[in-house]
Amino acid sequence: METNIPTIVMVIAASVVLGFAYFGRWLEGYGVLTEPLLCLGAGILLGPVGLATFDVRIGEPGDAFVHHAAEGVVGLAIMNAALRLEPDYVRRHWRSLAFVLTVGLFLMWVAAALALMVLPVTLATALLIAAIVTPTDPVLADSIVSGDVAQRNVPQRLRDAITAESAANDGLGYPFVVIAIILLTQEAIPWSDYIVGTILWEVCAATALGGAIGFVLGQLYGAARAHGLVETETSVPIFIAMTFVTLGAVQLMGADGILAVFTAGLAFRAFLDKEDMAGSVHFDALVDRTVTPLFFVLLGATLPFDDWVELGFPLLLGVVLVLLVRRLPAWLLIGFATPVYRGWRERAFAGWFGPVGVAAVFYVTLALRKVDAPALWPIVSAIIVGSMVVHGLTATPVSRWLGRHDSVAD
């Protein structure tokens, strides 16, 4: 009988989702294995080093699907994060948020670039890789700050801070990626063009458009609810559609849609009441339990094991250094200026949990469209896997450590 490869892929991927749906709480409670790691393992099994059911190589024309899949998953995760925050969260904590999204991002970028210099890459390449892995991934961050263990041990205030930062800094990481690409390609682009084209148009204008989309759709939703035209159950498809409408609209203006999704979600959230928020719970489950696991299965099939072996020990050393110095020292330093973090333990917790994941896949596939850098994907993918392993396996014990010393009443 002929092997039906698509069916094999479907059965294994769906089995992973079902397995974690049944046993996810047990695995989370004992810190045995995280869902992203389990899905990544399934992807490795399906990929070239396993059953070889499909072969997608990052950096080749066929990676367009991975790029758009990553963009969609990040967009949905950011929309999910924005809808979970209180409507006035950004207004109340804008100083702390602005500080970590400017000074914090810059320090992370520089620290990661310096750590990567142990690898056989140029400074320009190191800066590009660092820019790609600097933003905190909202997909993996959500798996850390949600769940029973986090709710029992991590203050809501701290979980909200990590959620907001991980959602916003993906879009604000884009200017760093553009600067690094300019340095690597040595393009003679005036700084005025960068400021106008990238900062003002691709970031600021896109952010404003996202907020406008969320506001208009929120007004329409409120009016429709008032006239009994929509029910809570219909909010999930609305959230999904709003995510992709925002991404598409911003792309049509030639800008980055990631940050725009966050502002769209924040603007829309202002029109939701407690009853409407029941729909956001279903949306959260859809993103976390279905969309995200399937992407990590895909990611597992793209991992470049041969390139990792070729890079050898310097790659391992580089990954370890990036995970250690990319974020934690900066957060211990700047935490004094961010009142949302109370005490060194909370700064250490937030500084440790800045995972690298799907957002890095989006940015590396974007960068590979503009530069010829074969080492880009092997190094970035190794950092992603290292982050998934280290942050995933330490989430439960470190959360419990924080809970033993801090009150979670707030």
Image (spheres, grey):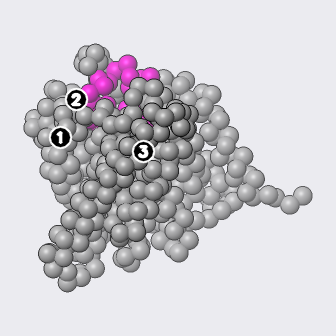
Start-end of magenta stretch: 142-163
Tell which circle, 3 or 2, labels the residue nearer the N-terminal end.
3
Label 2 packing within 10 angstroms: few (<14), some (14-19), many (20+): many
Residue drawn at (10%, 35%) of the image: 336
Instruction: Inspect the magenta stretch and tell me whether residue 144 lies in it.
Output: yes
Give the image location of residue 143, x and y in percent.
43, 36
Q: Which residue is tagged 2?
A: 346
Q: CA distance from mark 2 to mark 1?
A: 18 Å
Where is the N terminus found, in terms of image quarters?
bottom right
The numbered dot on residue 94 is 1
Relative vertical location of residue 404 with respect to residue 298 in this rendering, above or below = above
Give the image location of residue 200, x and y in percent.
20, 65
The numbered dot on residue 74 is none
Foreground: 72 or 406?
72
The majority secondary structure of the magenta stretch comes to helix
Q: Amino acid at mark 3?
A: Leu
Q: Amino acid at mark 1?
A: Trp
Residue drawn at (50%, 45%) of the image: 238
Q: Which residue is tagged 3?
A: 220
Q: CA distance from mark 3 to mark 2?
A: 40 Å
Instruction: Inspect the magenta stretch and tell me whether residue 215 lies in it.
Output: no
Q: Amino acid at mark 2?
A: Glu
Residue drawn at (41%, 47%) of the image: 217
Q: CA distance from mark 3 to mark 1?
A: 27 Å
